[in-house]
Amino acid sequence: GMDRLQGAPQALADLKRFDFDPPTASFDAAFNS
């Protein structure tokens, strides 16, 4: 029951905590070492 104009920015701020840099190596290269 939260207003979208209040809830959306709060949800985005919460999700940004889980943001990470993408890997530089390919997926298969991770298993070659």
Image (cartoon, helix red, strand yellow):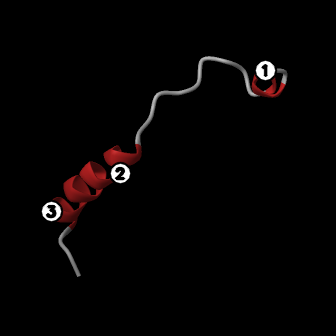
Q: Residues within 10 Å of mark 3 (few under 14, many from 20)?
A: few
To which quarter of the image does residue 8 belong? bottom left
For disc 1, the marked residue is 29
For disc 3, the marked residue is 6
Which image quarter is the N terminus in? bottom left
Give the CA separation, mark 2 to mark 3.
15 Å
Please state which amino acid type lies under the numbered disc 1.
Ala
Is 27 on the left-hand or right-hand side of 8? right
Please state which amino acid type lies under the numbered disc 2.
Leu
Secondary structure under the numbered disc 1 in the rendered image: helix
Q: Residue at x 40, y 46 (%)?
A: 18
Q: Residue at x 21, y 64 (%)?
A: 7
Which image quarter is the C terminus in? top right
Task: Pick whichever of labels 3 and 1 is earlier in the sequence.
Answer: 3
Give the CA separation, mark 3 to mark 1.
43 Å
Q: Residue at x 17, y 71 (%)?
A: 3
Q: Residues within 10 Å of mark 1 (few under 14, many from 20)?
A: few
Query: Furthest-front residue in view?
Result: 33
Question: In this view of the protein, which residue sits in the foreground, 11 or 29?
Answer: 29
For disc 2, the marked residue is 15
Work out whether 2 lies above or below 4: below
Question: In this view of the protein, which residue sits in the foreground, 20 or 12?
Answer: 20
Q: Residues within 10 Å of mark 2 (few under 14, many from 20)?
A: few
Are the two marked residues, 1 and 2, in contact with CB atoms closer than 8 angstroms?
no
Q: Which is more foreground, mark 3 or mark 1?
A: 1
Work out whether 1 lies above or below 21: below
